Image: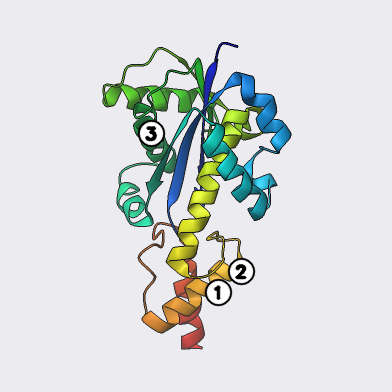
Amino acid sequence: MTKQLVAGFDEAGRGCVLGPLVLAVCVIDKNKEKMFKDAGVKDSKLLSSKQREELFELIKKEAEEYKIVVVPAEELNILMDRFSLNEIEAQKAAFAISKLKSTPLYLVFDSPDTTTTKFTKRIKDNLKAINHEYNYKIISEHKADLNHPSVSCASILAKVTRDEMLKKLVGLDISGYSSDPKTIDFLKDYFKKHKSFPEYTRMKWKTVDNIVNELYQKKLL
């Protein structure tokens, strides 16, 4: 059976206040899509930690190739002085794509832009900026991680990588999201002890200002 390569791209940790943004592009044989689905591959957010870790190994074994790009919080703090988070994601996506050795029929993105064509243009502009030539179709969709196994694979690769990195940085099993009480408690305790935040904190997030304001207001009271 002739291989039909397709590629998917997704990220993990985009909205986190702690830790890196991790992006992954995964190339799979379209003939293996059913195998991946039957194995349980889906959007990483719909899987348990154990399921993701097991599928992570399967994807690494069965994918044609994959690339993972890590953007530390320290780098994001600098880049966000000049670029939006969507633009940063497009820049890093273009870099990951440029490292692929195979040529897929098409590449699908889970678009962070409200208008999907806008993110497609971001990708194409950034590929042009680094002089990367390609002859495959680039598609941006909402909920692509639900509809395309290749994007689901990328989602799992990014999520597992990020979770492992964050646990090593923090020493605790927390998500790093502002909506997570454990993450907020960790940041508050760290700030009380050190009068600063750890270097892997996204300082552009309003969460950071809110914590400082809350702690100092309590002190004044």
Q: Residue type at mark 3: give it.
A: Ala
Q: Do the residues bearing badges 1 and 2 touch, measured as CB atoms within 8 Å? A: yes
Q: Quadrant of residue 28?
A: top right
Q: Nearer the viewer, residue 105 or 29?
A: 29
What type is the residue that disc 2 sits on?
Pro
State the SS at label 3: helix
Q: Nearer the viewer, mark 2 or mark 3?
A: 3
Name the residue beneath numbered marker 3.
96
Q: Earlier in the sequence, mark 1 or mark 3?
A: 3
Measure the alpha-carbon separation of dots 2 and 3.
33 Å
Q: Quadrant of the N terminus?
A: top right
Q: Amino acid at mark 1?
A: Asp
Q: Residue at x 34, y 30 (%)?
A: 99
Taking 71 as reference, is 4 above or below it?
A: above
In the depicted structure, whether residue 185 falls above or below residue 83? below
Q: Which residue is mark 1?
A: 185
Residue indicated by mark 2? 181
